[in-house]
Image: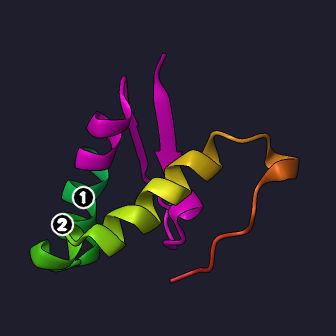
């Protein structure tokens, strides 16, 4: 099953989409995009605390829209 998440769902201000077939694939693509397009330092993109934030946003985006918790904007 494909998973898709947008930057907007992650709290960033654009509509770029990342898709993949597994949670690990999505997270890797999110890290790469955050580093290349949002200027997130590579060290920060690999910190457990940042990964936890992104994992929560990915899980949240798979919930029905009425059950989602709004993500803070960048």
Mark 2 closeness class: few <14, some 14–19, many ≥20 residues within 10 Å: few
Q: Magenta region: which residues?
A: 1-28
Q: Are marks 1 and 2 in contact (CB under 8 Å)?
A: yes
Q: Is residue 44 shown above or below 60?
A: below
Q: Residue furthest front?
A: 48
Q: Position of residue 25 (x, y in %)?
A: 27, 35
User: Residue 23: which numbered mark, if any?
Assistant: none
> Quarter of the image holding residue 19?
top left
Q: Residue furthest bottom?
A: 74
CA separation in Å, label 1 and label 2: 8 Å
Give the residue at x 50% y 45%.
5
Give the residue at x 54% y 58%.
57
Is-magenta flag for residue 22?
yes
Q: How is the image coloured?
A: rainbow
Give the residue at x 49% y 72%.
12
User: Residue 46: which numbered mark, if any?
Assistant: 2
* Element class at badge 1: helix
Q: Is residue 20 shown above or below 36?
A: above
What residue sits right under mark 1 in the picture? 31
* Labels in figure, total: 2
Q: Is residue 50 shown above or below 57?
A: below
Give the residue at x 49% y 66%.
14
Q: Position of residue 52 (x, y in %)?
A: 40, 64
* Element class at badge 2: loop
Q: Position of residue 6 (x, y in %)?
A: 50, 51
Mark 1 closeness class: few <14, some 14–19, many ≥20 residues within 10 Å: many
> Quarter of the image holding residue 40?
bottom left
Task: Pick the residue in front: 61 or 52.
Answer: 52
First in sequence: mark 1 or mark 2? 1
């Amino acid at each position: 099953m494909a998973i898709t998440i947008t930057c907007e769902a992650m709290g960033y201000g654009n509509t770029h989409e990342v898709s993949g077939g597994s949670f690990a694939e999505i997270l890797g693509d999110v890290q790469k995009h955050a580093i290349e397009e949002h200027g997130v330092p590579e060290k920060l993109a690999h910190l457990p605390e940042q990964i936890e934030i992104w994992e929560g946003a990915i899980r949240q985006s798979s919930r029905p829209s009425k059950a989602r918790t709004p993500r803070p904007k960048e």
